[in-house]
Structure formats: C-alpha cells, structure tokens
Image: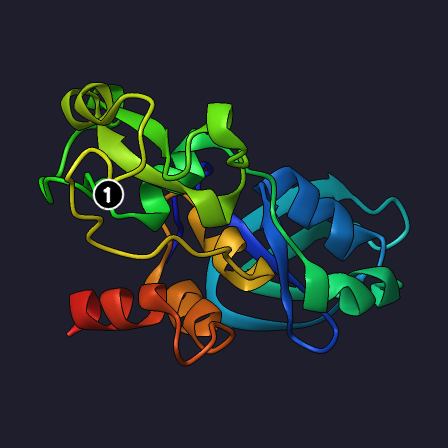
Amino acid sequence: MTQPLAQQVLRTDVSGMPLEWVDYQTAVRLYHFGHVAYTCGTPLYQVRGGTNAASGRRTLIEVNSIIATTGDQSALRHSRETYSPPLNNPALFKRDAHTCLYCGHPFQARDLSRDHVRPLSTGGADAWANVVTACKRCNNHKANRTPEQARMQLLAIPFVPTHAEYVYLRGRRILADQMEFLLAHFPRSSPLQARLRAQMC
C-alpha cells in the first residue's frame, strides 16, 4: 500500500541498530547509490525515475519502511555506552507522554514546560536526568525550589533515553512495523517499553 510522501523511513546500520529517520528522497538516494544492504517492514513507496536509453525501461525503486544501510558506524557503536541524546522540549514532552509529572494531567505541548528537578540556580544541570515535563501552573508553583522544598511529589524518575529510544522520540507517525522494530532495541527496563507495549495491546 502506498503511503503519503511525508511518511518517514527508519534507517538502520547493517547490524539492524536504528540510526535515524529519513525522508523518501534520502531513502531513494541510498537505494540508487547501492547503500541499502537489506530491507525490513512493509513497502511504502514505488518511485519511478527516468527511462534507460539502451533498454527503454523506466527505473523503479521500491522503498520499504525500514532500510539497513552500509557504511562505517563504528564511532556510534563505541559511543553507545555513554550516549546522551541532545535535549529538546518536543522529545522531552514525548518521553513523559505529554503529562505533567507533578499533577499527572496530560496537556498540549503549548501548555507544557521544562522543569529542572534540582534548579539551575542551585547547581542543577540542564540534562535529561534532571528535567521533567511540567504544566506551566505546576512549574510556576514549584518555582526555584526542589520538589521536596515545594512539597510536590514527582510522579516518575527522569531518565536518559538510549539512542534507539531517542530515534523513537524524534519520530512522527510511526508505523506498527517500525514501532515493533524500535521496541526490540529498547532496554527491557525502559519506562517507554512498558508504556508503548500497553498502548499496542
């Protein structure tokens, strides 16, 4: 079944480790230059190119939802043990299911903010392990205090996403086969693993 051209393709290395999302143009270039080692998942697109002058045949590239690509990924493999993805609000809010981790209510992104569990002014870091999603009301009430000082209960412990989890957090409209593939690369103890599996049931 042909998907809308906005549907992202999941790119992995040859070992199957998720790397990033790419658009269909990038995927077609990877196919064209012979960088796709194998494919998984469902066919997404059939992209037709020019006509071969010698054979008279028109080129056709079928793009799958998951493509494994060649290339040297040794640097990424070596850094996975200490990997910390870049911190940004859209990924943070998705990590925390767009839920305020103080009052427990879900919100639209425009009504959420990044709260530093240990405030920056007292030496807290602007890092995954020290930030949570908070609604603006709770963040204003907590102000420049720790949850204990503000007598507010933190509903979950912030965590640093792995590389595979961060790929998920950066995804838009993830297909079922792509989600299953990503989940297989999440740590078994991952809060995301439990939450997403429950949503799929």
Residues 133 and 154: in front is: 154
For the point 35% across and 31% down, the residue is 115
75 on left or right of 182: right
Residue position for label 1:
148
Kind of residue indicated by mark 1:
Glu
Q: Quadrant of the C terminus?
A: bottom left
Q: Relative to 13, is 170 above or below? A: above
Residue 126: percent from the left, percent from the top?
Answer: 53, 33
Residues 138 and 77: in front is: 138
Residues 198 and 103: in front is: 103
Q: Is residue 170 visible?
A: no
The quarter of the displayed image where residue 179 is located: bottom left
The quarter of the displayed image where residue 76 is located: bottom right
Residue 132: percent from the left, percent from the top?
Answer: 34, 41
For the point 50% across and 55% down, the residue is 160
Q: Relative to 1, is 102 above or below? A: above
